[in-house]
Amino acid sequence: MGQLSPDGKWSWDGTKWVAVAPPPVPPARNPFQQIPGLRTGAAWKLAIGGFAALLLIAAISSAAKQPPTTPTGHEVAQVSSSSAPVAKQSTEPVAKPSPTPSPTPVPTPTPSPSPKAVATSAPPAPAPPPPPPAQNTCGAPANPWGYNFCGGNLIYSPPSNFCSYFNCIASFWKSTNGYVDQCKDGTYSHSGGRQGACSSHSGELRPLYSP
């Protein structure tokens, strides 16, 4: 053989390095063959084998009768955690809260300007009509009915405010059986043409007329 490499795996054959084949591995030996007497086929080998089988069976039976060992706290925790029911995740859809609608802004009403009163000059008041010409009552007191002593119709039903314009006697509205006439003392009676008219006022003077 040529020169070997330092690791003993290569050999130089003069031209190149050639891989060295590994040495053959010797066959495995039975350790019992190293004991003197076991190399022979003596009958006592059967007795030893049977005794060993009995020991093995006894060991298996003893192990089966032993109570199971209690797991440690760490193992109990692992068993408890693994046996605990796992909460199932709900697949039902979750109702999403509807968004709260934002309040719609209410427009602020713009106050309309109040019209300002414009001072205007008042039109001139019309001139009052000229007063009617005074009626000729022929000496009778002025009154709104035009009663007079000039002539016309006798007055049998004077208005209720007659005595506001004429000087009536106390019994003017008690004795209403005649027409209105004037007594001699200037008072007025409602019993004209009847007996006893103006008896307490010097007698009758003249009747009063309506136009």
Image (cartoon, grey):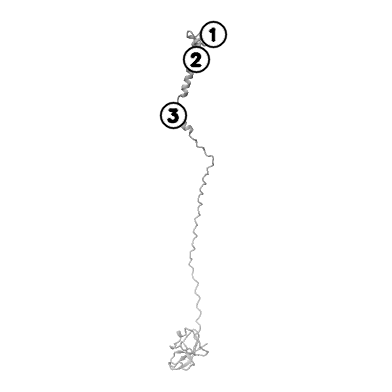
Q: How would you rate the neighbour count of disc 1 (Cα within 10 Å): few for under 14, some for 14-19, many for 20 or more?
A: some
Rendered residue at 48%/15% (across/down)? 52
Do callouts 3 and 2 mark residues in contact (Cβ within 8 Å)? Answer: no
Mark sitting earlier along the chain (3/2)? 2
For this rendering, which residue is in front, 69 or 111? 69
Q: What percent of the width, then of the height, locates residue 159?
A: 49, 84
Q: Which mark is residue 50?
A: 2
Q: What percent of the width, then of the height, locates residue 135?
A: 50, 86
The residue type indicated by label 1 comes to: Ser
**Which residue position is annotated with label 1?**
11
Q: Residue furthest right?
A: 15
Rendered residue at 44%/29% (across/down)? 74
Mark sitting earlier along the chain (1/3)? 1
Q: Which mark is residue 74?
A: 3
Which type of secondary structure does the marked residue at label 3 adopt? Answer: helix
For this rendering, which residue is in front, 103 or 46? 46
